[in-house]
Image (cartoon, grey):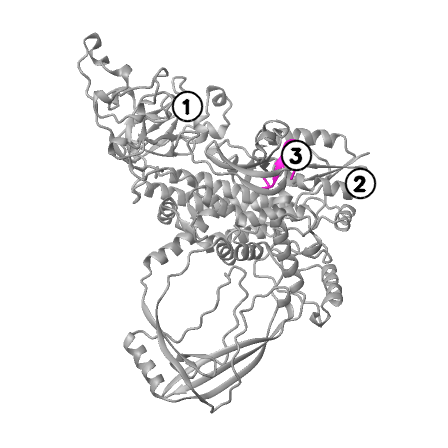
Amino acid sequence: MTKLLLIESPGKLKKLSQILGSGWIVKASMGHVRELANDGESSLGFDLEGDRVWCRYQPRGSRGKQTLADLKRAVEGASQVYLGTDPDREGETIAWHLQQALRIHRPLRVTYSEITPAAVRQAIDRPRPLDANLVAAGRARDCLDKLVGYKGSPLLWKLNNGAKSMGRVQSATLHLICLREGEIVAFVPEDYWSVWVEYQEGFKAFYRSSLNLKKTVAEKEADDAAEKLPERPESDRVSTQAEADRLVEIARSHSHCVVKIERQNTRRNPPPPFTTSTLQQAAGSRYKWGSDKTMKVAQTLYEGGHITYMRTDSVTLSPDFCAAARRWLEQHDADNIPSQTRKFRAKAGAQEAHEAIRPTHVENTPERLPDLSVDSAKLYDLIWNRAIASQCRPAELQKTRVVTQSGDIFWEARGQIVTFAGYTRYWNNLSADTHLPPLQEGQDLTLKKADSEKKKTQPPPRYTEPKLVQLMERKGIGRPSTYAPTIRTLKDRNYVDLGKDKKLHPTQLGLEVDLFLRQVLPDLLQPEFTAKMEATLDEIAAGKQDWECYLNHWYRDYLSPALTQAKQQVSNYRSPSTLTHSAASSPEKSTQKASKQTRSRKTKSESKTAASPSSIACPKCDRPMSKVPSKSPKLATDHFLKCDEKLGGCGAVMFWSDRQKQYELPYSERKHTEKTATTNSQTSQNWWEQPIKTESALPPWLKGRNKKKGRSKRHIKTPEMSDIRCPKCDRFMSKILSKSPKLAADHFLKCDRSLGGCDTVMFWSDKYQQYELPYGSQPKTTPQLTDYKCPVCQSHLEEYHYTKEGIEKSMLRCSDVKNRREQCKDVAYFRSLRERWWSPKFGEM
C-alpha cells in the first residue's frame, strides 16, 4: 500500500518525492486549511464558558475547501499517513487541523529541520504523536489574537479616519515607532564643539577634560542591525565657542609631549550563528532588504535543501555540523580551529525548538552553488560564512592609547590593529585598523594644526526594519514567525511608511491610532504586557498551564473590563486629526451579511434579547447607541440601534438601510436635504467632472427640469467643503450630495476644478471603512524584470503589481508581450499563503 506524507509548502514536493522514492505520495496543504469561523459574538468563532473554550472552525476560503477535498481522497487511498508540516508551533497546529479535518486515525508526526536524505529518513523512522501542548499554544494564540482584534477594532472605527484594525502584537509594535517619533519631535538640538590637534608625527588627538579615564573602551555587543558607517572620533564636548577657542589657543601656544602610552592585547569572540531575528537584521543592514523579502528568500533556500529551518530563536548547532565544520577548516584553514568546539548561550526566553540557521552541507560553499538566483546566492553567502565563522578562533587585537599634554590640557589618541584575523576571515564585524606611529613616554611632539569643529546634537534615529526587529526581540514582542508579518501588516494598514531614507515613519493615521489606544487601552501597548502574554504562551507550549483556563481568566479579569471602560471613554474622545470622515459608520461585517435564513439558524448565545453596546454614535446627542435584537420581518437585519434612556440617552432609534448601506433615523425624523443631480447612463461625460455652483453648470438633461409641471426654479446649493485632501494634488475636496443607489453613502468627494483642483473623485467604501479612488484609477507601476525564467519560452518573468478589492498584490508573468498573449497566456505565478511564488498550472517556482 502507498504511504502518504502531508506537508505545508508545494515548494518541497519535488525534493521530498526524490528523497522518499517509490511507494510514497507527497501532498501539500498550501499552508493553513482551516480557520476560526466568523460567527457568534463579535464574529469570534468561539465561545468562552466557565473555564472552557468552544471553537468552531471552517475551511479557509474556497481554496481551503478544494485542498481538503483533494487531501481526503489521497488519505482514503493510503495505508499510513505522516504529517510532515513545519517543525514549529504553527506547523504543529496545522498538522492538528489536518488530522481533525481529514479524520486521520493515529497520525504519525514527523519533523526535520533540513530537507536532506539523512534528516528526512531519520524523521520517518522515528515518528511521534502530535504534541498536544504545542497545539494548545497555537490554538490559544489564534483565539487571543482574534479576541483582541475583533473586540478592539470596532473602537477604532469610531474615529472614522480609515483605521482598519488593532492587534495584540501590531499595536505594541506601532507604539514603539510612535514613541520614537515623539522623541524626535520633542528633541531640541544643541550646539557643541569638538577640539583636536594634529601632529607632524602622523596622528590626531582629541581633547579630554580629565586624565582619569578607563584604560580601554568597553567592547560593544555585536550588532547585526548596525549600518556600516566610518567611525568618527570626537573630543569631550565643549559647550561654548569661547571655551573651544581658549583650548585651541592653549594648544597653539604650549609645547606638546607624550605623557602616557597604554597597550593591551584583547580577543574578540565570534558571533553566534543566525537566528530568524539576526538574519533579518544582517540582510537588512548589508543588502537593505526588508524583513519580508529576507524570509521569502530564506524559504526558497530551505525548500531547496540548502539551509535548515529558518524560523528559530536558537543559537545551537548540531554536533554533526560542528564536526563537519572542523573537518572543513582542517582542510582549508587549519590555523583557525579552536581548541574546543564553541557553544553559545541562548537569550532569556528563547524556545530553542530547533537549530540555528545554517547550511545543510558545509562543503557546499557559495561558489559551488552557481544555479541559485542572485538574491538566494547573496543570502546563502551570509548564512554559510556566519555559520563557519561561529566555529573559528577569536580575532586577536592590539589596542593602543596615547595621552599627550600641552599646558594643563590633555589630548588622547587611540589605535587598533588586528594581529590575528580569526573568525573575521569569514565574518568581519570589526572597524578598520587605526595605526599610531612608534612613540615613547616623554617624547616631544611637533604641532601641525589645532582647531575646533562645531557640531549639533542629533535626535535619536528612526528605526530601520532590522533595528525594529531587533527591538521587538529584545522586548519580547512577538516570536520569530511573527516579526516580518507584523511589519507588513503595519505597512498594509497605512500605519507606517518606509521613507526614502529606508526608515519607518509613522503616518498621520498611525499616530492617531496610537494616541487613541494610549487613552482607551494603554496596557495593550506596553511591551512588558505583551511580552508577558508571549511568555504565558511558551508556558502553555511546555505543558505548564492550561490554555482554556488562561484565555477565560484573561478575558474576564482584563480584556472585558478594559473594553467596558474604553467604550465609556470613546464617547467623549475627539480625534485631533484633520483627516476625519463625516460619513456614517457601517455595521459590523457579520451584521451586513445577516439574512432571514441565517437568523432562523442562530445559536442560543446569539438569540439573547439583552442589548449590547455598539460603536455607532447617536446623531442627536452623540452618545453611543445600544444594539437591540429583534426578529421583526420588517427589518433588514436582526437588530436596531437605540439611544438608551437608562444610560442617559435621548431615546432615538436607527435602522439599517440596505440601499444606503448605513443606519438611518425613521423617515419622519430625518433632516431632508434638497435633491441634487443624479447620474444618467446616456450622458457623454461624467457629471461630477463639472463644478456644481449654478444651474448653468448642471448636465444638459437636468437644465430646465425645474420649469416642468409648474415646479418653481430649483436652488442649487454650493457644495460643502470636507476635511479630506485630494490624494493627487493635496487640495481639500468638496462633498457632493447624491442619492445614487450605487453609492455606499449619501455623497461623494470631488476635487473641484473651479477651486484649482484636478477633478479627482473619491467614494466611501463600507468594506475598507475609508474613501477610495474609483477602481482602475490607481497609479500603475512599471513591471520589474526578475531572475526567474518563463517555463514555456524561457524569457525572463516580470513582477507585475495590481490592485484587487482594494488590496495591493503582485504576480509574475512572461515579459514577452507577444508570447504572453499566445503560448504563455497560462504562465502566472501568485503569492501563496506561505509567501512563495506558486502557479496553478506549473506549481511552485
Where is the C terminus found, in terms of image quarters?
Answer: top right
Tell me the amino acid under the disc marked 2. Answer: Gly
Percent x, y of residue 638: 42, 24
Where is the N terminus found, in terms of image quarters?
Answer: top right
- Which residue: 67% across, 68% down? 392
Residue bearing mark 2:
21
Numbered disc in front, either 1 or 3: 3
- Label 1, label 3: how many angstroms apart (C-alpha)? 54 Å
Packing grade of label 3 (10 A; few <14, some 14-19, many >=20) is: few
Q: Which mark is residue 637?
A: 1
Q: Which mark is residue 793?
A: 3
- Which residue: 47% across, 22% down? 599
- Label 2, label 1: how many angstroms apart (C-alpha)? 57 Å
- Which residue: 25% across, 22% down? 669
Residue at the outermost top position: 709
Mark 2 vs 1, N-terminal side:
2
- Label 3, secondary structure: give it: loop
- Contact? badges 3 and 2 (CB < 8 Å): no
Percent x, y of residue 131: 67, 46
Packing grade of label 2 (10 A; few <14, some 14-19, many >=20) is: few
Residue 24 picture quarter: top right
Numbered disc in front, either 3 or 2: 3
Is 124 located above or below residue 333 in the figure? above
Packing grade of label 1 (10 A; few <14, some 14-19, many >=20) is: many
**Magenta extent:** 833-845
Would residue 683 be counted in the magenta stretch?
A: no
Mark 1 vs 3, N-terminal side:
1
Mark 3 vs 2, N-terminal side:
2
Percent x, y of residue 576: 29, 45
- Which residue: 46% across, 36% down? 780
- Label 1, secondary structure: give it: loop
Tell me the amino acid under the disc marked 3. Answer: Cys
